[in-house]
Image: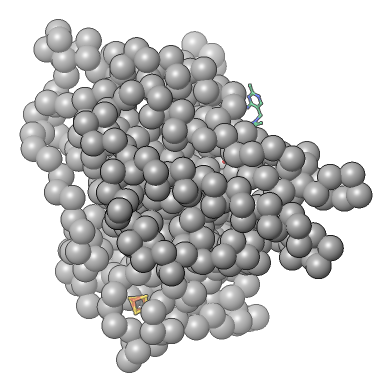
Amino acid sequence: MPKQTLPQVPIKKGEPAYKLWIFEPGWKGELPLILNPRQLAEQKRPALLPGHRLCAGCAAPIIVKLASFAFRGPTIVVNATGCLEVATTIFPYTSWAVPWIHNAFENAASTGSGVEAAIKALKKTGRLPYDHVDVVIFGGDGGTFDIGFQALSGAAERGHDFLYILYDNEAYMNTGIQRSGGTPPFAWTTTSPVGKVIPGKQQAKKPIADIMVAHRIPYVATATPAHWLDLMKKVRKGIEVDGPAFIHALSPCDRGWRHGTELAIEIARRAVDTCYFPLWEWTPETGYMLTDRSLAIARNPSLKQPIEKFVEVQGRFKHLLKPENRELLKKFQEYVDMVWEDLLKRAVNTPK
Amino acid sequence: MAELRGYKELPIGAIPFRLSTDYKTGDWRALRPVVDHNKCVKCMLCWIYCPDMAVIWDGEKILINYDYCKGCGLCAHECPVKAITMEPEPTE
Ligand SMILES: Cc1ncc(C[n+]2csc(CCOP(=O)(O)OP(=O)(O)O)c2C)c(N)n1
Ligand code: SF4
Ligand code: SF4
Ligand code: SF4
Ligand SMILES: [Mg+2]
């Protein structure tokens, strides 16, 4: 096998531009969680390398990159089938700078459970060369809300120690934009087309993060790549807790959502500004807590933007802006408000 | 390409063994981001958000690695001081 070399970019200060994550046996300690952007750019290198074949402007690699900045040491990544898995491991290439395993579409949580059980067994028998090895699972919405849900629910109930990060691009993107349990109402997909018969998806979005809260696992949160500090802090918390943790990260997809390749972060920001995708975290001790921009909106409701702001930049919703569909847009707004009001009632830090 | 191996020599499962950095995605690009170093306030947002790890901070300034940059324009869109412009790729 030819020797692997990483591209050498001359760096004046800090780490080389690209790095494989190698921990010598016996490595102890904890990688720092760096929140200062300049220090981050000098000291942290992502677990994902360039050369991956995700679409230009896809948010999924941004989520992975930010999450990996919050890893605390040796980490094994488990991936469900989907865009992220397919496009980062096109044989014979891999974009992963950390150990990585893919098994099937429906069983990322079971695979993660097995990896975690193996780590435990090695530790018990004195064969693990580290204090701890963390397990982080990435699954898409199809692989999480739908086909992988049984595996996830079972793994959560068994109490395996992993962090599951759902990157939610709100449809089965890798196979051509089919609707999933994570697709929002009225969104166009190839299996919820917009036409004379129906105006996009007819059902609601499954409240997956609340369903994970109902499992009473130690940590559940929502996040977006736009709110990068919030995301990194939540990933570190999810890794630190003992037992299963779940983060639901919104992942704009320019192919499936029909938006410009430069807009992934802008749209994730608007998703939070319109309260379409509120930011919160939950632990059994604290209950629901609003975070970041969503907390700011709860404190100052005039910051809340109308749902048009989220809809207007995405082709999958363009029918909602037609004059004859004003009623549908109103319905979408009511749906968003209902979910937001419900969260405000439950969050312990909602200003009274 | 790799040398061919029989099934007895292969490990269980498929092991992607070459780093994807050997695969240059820069040829996907139609527009190229160009940084105006006089405008840049070194906020690092382009570095934080680039989906292709193509923004490099060399300790003094922001560089773009055109070997991998797919030209999505996200860095230019997010730059708070508009220090990045998307320019047509030179045709030759
Ligand atoms: C059991 C099984 N059914 C169907 C497929 C085909 N398949 C591969 S990826 C995919 C869609 C994945 O959707 P999602 O989990 O939302 O990830 P995305 O591609 O959107 O990132 C499907 C249906 C499969 N690999 N395995
Ligand atoms: S289809 Fe969407 S999620 Fe998949 S790689 Fe392209 S932009 Fe990313
Ligand atoms: S255009 Fe896109 S891929 Fe290129 S450097 Fe900017 S953010 Fe990265
Ligand atoms: S986003 Fe703009 S100002 Fe900030 S570091 Fe990048 S080029 Fe400079
Ligand atoms: Mg999906």
Q: Is residue B82 left or right of residue B87?
A: left
> Which quadrant, please, contains the N terminus of chain A?
top left
Q: Is residue A102 left or right of residue A175?
A: left
Which color scheme does this rendered protein use? one colour
For the point 17% across and 26% down, the residue is A132
In percent of width and height, residue A212 lies at 42, 28
Q: Is residue A33 left or right of residue B88?
A: left
For the point 54% across and 14% down, the residue is B7
Q: Is residue A62 above or below residue B45?
A: above
| Label total for image | 0
Q: Nearer the viewer, residue B63 or A291?
A: A291
In percent of width and height, residue A183 lies at 63, 42
Q: Is residue A281 above or below residue B3?
A: below
- Quarter location, residue A72: top left
Q: Is residue A199 above or below residue A248?
A: below
Q: Is residue B24 visible?
A: no
In percent of width and height, residue A314 lies at 66, 61
Q: Residue furthest right?
A: A196
- Quarter location, residue A87: top right
Q: Nearer the viewer, residue B74 or B10?
A: B74
Q: Nearer the viewer, residue A14 or A302?
A: A302
Q: Is residue A44 visible?
A: yes
In percent of width and height, residue A200 lies at 77, 47
For the point 89% across and 44% down, the residue is A197
For the point 30% across and 53% down, the residue is A352
